[in-house]
Image (cartoon, helix red, strand yellow):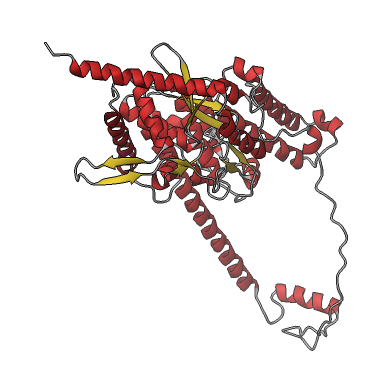
Amino acid sequence: MTTASRQPTLRSQAHLQGTQSQRRKTQPCKRACLHPRHPSYISLLIINLLAWGLTSTYGQSISRQTLFSKKSITELTQHPPTPQQQKFQEVTTTPVVINNYNPILGNSSIEQQNRIILQQQGMLPGQTNQQQKELQSLKQEMRQDEIEAEKAAYMAKMKPFENSLNEFLKMNPDSFSISKAIYLTESAWYDNPPTYQQFENAIKQRAALVKQILKQEGVNPNSNIAKNYGIQKLYKQDTKYINPKTKQTFIAPKVTYDFNDPYGDKNWSNMFLTKLLGTGKGQCHSMPLLYLAIAEQLGAKAYLSLSPEHSFIQYFNENGYRYNFETTNGNLVNQTWLMQSNYINATALKNKTYLDTLSNRQLYAQLLSDLLQNYTGKVGYDNFSQQLTQQILAINPKNIAALMTQANFNTFIARDELKAVGYPPVNEIPNYPKVNQAYQNMLQSYQLIDEQGFQEMPKEAYQQWLKTIETEKKKEENQEIQKRMKAEIEMLKKLKSVMLKTPKG
């Protein structure tokens, strides 16, 4: 699953769910604002929009790519279904005793109405005008308290994401800490997150384990190929680890794929590296992130690469040969297998949407899109999510997750505008400039996604594709890749042995 990712976990992708129908604007950090914010209620349009909300199915890779469904003008203009007449069972009734019965006025329906009118005017025993005013005032105060409580709850959810964005914007997109960026995207989600030191220490422990592996196998630890080889061992087999301080020995289980809620449908945080560090289990969003974080600690060069609903690792040897490492099963794979999902078209390859390495700047935008998808999943769509979307697109205009989030937003607005004018017939929509403009904006956002070569990949197709790796790794082409890597490692072992035997000076 990718984050796109989250929405590319490409987060992968998010789909519609009901969230709270009202939300307030809040003061964002000014560095994130592309447009000024005002401390007032969100417009009616945005309030209606937020009622639709989002749920992210991050089972779709680090590209937690926000799932969107293209809507035709016919779908958008469909009226709600006409309620069908219901048949009710007969029930027995008992006479209703009317309180405050007035014997003078009687109890007919007309008399009862008159009695209510007189009582409202303070001309009968019961509530006086003053009492009614006091009751209305009390209701207004209670409603105001509810509004303040809703505002406080919204701010409590929104503020950590705003803080994370502030920290993100302090980093250089072309040179930044991958571990810190991942932590910022995930810690904002939790009510009580671990400290960054705890998060980083868990990564450093695995980096130390890689160093021990290379030392035990007699491989030159300074080689980029060797460092990647050591990291891959963590995904292939259980490893004996010796604590350098206590000298205690224990077995570190290999990193494995988590088949329990791999798309984050039940719990979005199952897509997080934080969860993987705590359990040793992850999926194609968190497992490649762990690889990158360890590589950063070791000074190794490795790159995130995307495919539909998926992410994996690429790295190169000294001659420029490209290796593809599939973290979900700990195997080197060939480009042909990656293409066999049937959801990678020529447009995607031409635009380098898939199967290419992400630059530092693209990775920075990708991790920001994780923050965006985490936000829309927990808080919803609002001005902050829109400004974050624009921030991502300013860094990488081709980021699939941000483009999908924008498409979702524009779809909601088009639907909301159509509803506001009573769902006019298709041929009358051009008579409503505001509605027509919203619809055109929606189509334009769809076109931007199409231009990147994106094709939606069903969950069933994705899981079926992953299963083919067991037969694929037995094929001759894959076996040749394994032999190439093994030969390079054996060469490094011999080289180190020669260097150790060579007299110094």
Residue at screen point 56% across, 22% down: 476
Furthest-bottom residue in this view: 103
Q: Is residue 33 visible?
A: no
Vertical comparison of 127 with 384: above or below: below
Q: Where, quadrant-wise, is the N terminus in this rendering?
A: top right
Residue at screen point 34% across, 23% down: 226
Vertical comparison of 160 with 103: above or below: above
Front-most of 177 and 79? Answer: 177
Residue at screen point 65% across, 71% down: 129
Residue at screen point 64% across, 39% down: 459
149 left or right of 127 in image: left
Q: Is residue 252 visible?
A: yes
Q: How far from the left and from the top, in percent, is residue 198? A: 31, 44
Vertical comparison of 246 with 371: above or below: below
Q: How far from the left and from the top, in percent, is residue 9? A: 53, 36
Front-most of 451 and 149? Answer: 451
Q: How far from the left and from the top, in percent, is residue 495? A: 28, 16
